[in-house]
Structures are given as C-alpha cells and as structure tokens.
Amino acid sequence: MSIDPHSVLHKKNKERIVKSLFVVCSLLYSYCSFSQAYFLKVDRLKKGEIVKTKTYYEGHWVKLKTINGSKLKGNYFIYDENTIIVNDQKVALNDILRIRFDNRHLFSGTLLTILGPPTFLIGLTATALEDSFSREDNNSNAEIATALGLGALVGGIVILSNKNKRPLKKKWKVSILVQ
C-alpha cells in the first residue's frame, strides 16, 4: 500500500516535520546566541605592546606555579574576572608565576617524527627501484609513500617545536575574556 502524495495524512506529516525542524532550529539558535564562552587570554608583551595573543577555552588542562610556590595541575575554570579555579583551589591571575597549557599533540608529534623517516626512505627506495626497472612515468604508490613520509616528518617536527610554557614575569599578561 503506497501513500498518495495528495492525501490528508501525507500533508499532516509534512506539516509536523516542518514544525519540528523549526522548533529544533530555534532551540539551536537560542542556545548558541545566549551561551557565553570564557577564555583565558595570554598576551605576549614587547616594550609594553602586545606582540602575540593566544586564547584557551575554559576547561583546558593546565599546569601552573604560583608566587607562593604551590604547583597545581588540572582543568581550569573561570571563577570571576580575576580568578580561576584549578583542582578546587582559587588562584588569582596576579599570583600566577608560570603557566603551561595542555600539549595534546605531544604523542602525535612524536609518532609522526618516528614513523616519518622510515616511510620516506621506503618510498624513496621503492621509487628508485621502480624507475630503474620500468620506463613508464606514472604516479605510483612509492612516490605517494615518499611524499607522505616527508610530510609526516615535517609535521611531527612542527608539532613538537610548539612549546606551551609561558613564564609570566614581564613578558606575558594573562586576562579573562567573556564572549
């Protein structure tokens, strides 16, 4: 039994679907427009001017050292415009001596750096052997492996060279943004 596209039942289902989509879209729009995002903003200062700015969402893993010598590790949350909370301890932004954010790419950078050179060398060797035995010039898997290995090596080095340690003496300024 097929449903007639001009039947009353088909039109009612169509209206329900349109109404449901309208409600879902309205809820998503209101959720996105009325929600606030908190950031920890770290500015690099050079001769009193901001040279570089990095922002970190609330909830990132952080390791910090305060002026009084206590070391804290864990996810940070914003308490007010001058205070953050790490492991249920309030820390004023002025009391932070050093701060280090999560470098989640450490494992992937190490993996790419380790796997990149062998892939590159295998691909290079296979390309050389293939070119010596065949006269066809086509894109082979060996050339693709060479490019992927070189790309993995360079990507791993770039990822590992990104250090997230921020000593906060005169060079860095930490503030909280609400968006």
Image (cartoon, rainbow, N blue to C red):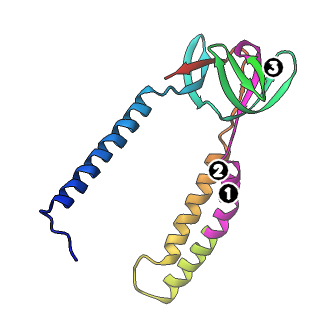
Between 10 and 163, the one nearer to me in the picture: 10
Residue 43 percent across, percent down from the top left: 59, 21
Q: How crowded is mark 2: few (under 14 residues within 10 Å), some or many (20 or more)?
A: some
Q: Earlier in the sequence, mark 2 or mark 3?
A: 3
- Amino acid type assigned to the residue bearing label 1 in the image: Thr
The image's mark for residue 66 is 3
The image's mark for residue 14 is none
Residue 121 percent across, percent down from the top left: 63, 71
- Amino acid type assigned to the residue bearing label 3 in the image: Thr
Label the magenta part by its dominant secondary structure: helix
- Residue extending farthest top: 48
Judge whether 159 appears above or below 40 on screen: below
Callout 2 touching callout 3 (CB < 8 Å): no
In the rendered structure, which segment of residues is drawn in magenta?
92-119
Disc 2 target residue: 157
- Residue extending farthest left: 6
Residue 124 percent across, percent down from the top left: 57, 73
- Amino acid type assigned to the residue bearing label 2 in the image: Ile
Q: Quadrant of residue 125?
A: bottom right
Callout 1 touching callout 2 (CB < 8 Å): yes
Q: Which of marks 1 and 2 is nearer the N terminus?
A: 1
Q: Residue at x 20, y 60 (%)?
A: 9
Q: Which quarter of the image is occupied by the N terminus?
A: bottom left
Measure the C-alpha gap from mark 3 to mark 1: 34 Å
Measure the C-alpha gap from mark 2 to mark 3: 31 Å
Q: In which quarter of the image is residue 65?
A: top right
Residue 19 shown left or right of residue 173 in the figure: left
Between 39 and 1, the one nearer to me in the picture: 1
Q: Which secondary structure, mark 1?
A: helix
Residue 27 percent across, percent down from the top left: 39, 37
Measure the C-alpha gap from mark 1 to mark 2: 6 Å
Disc 1 target residue: 113
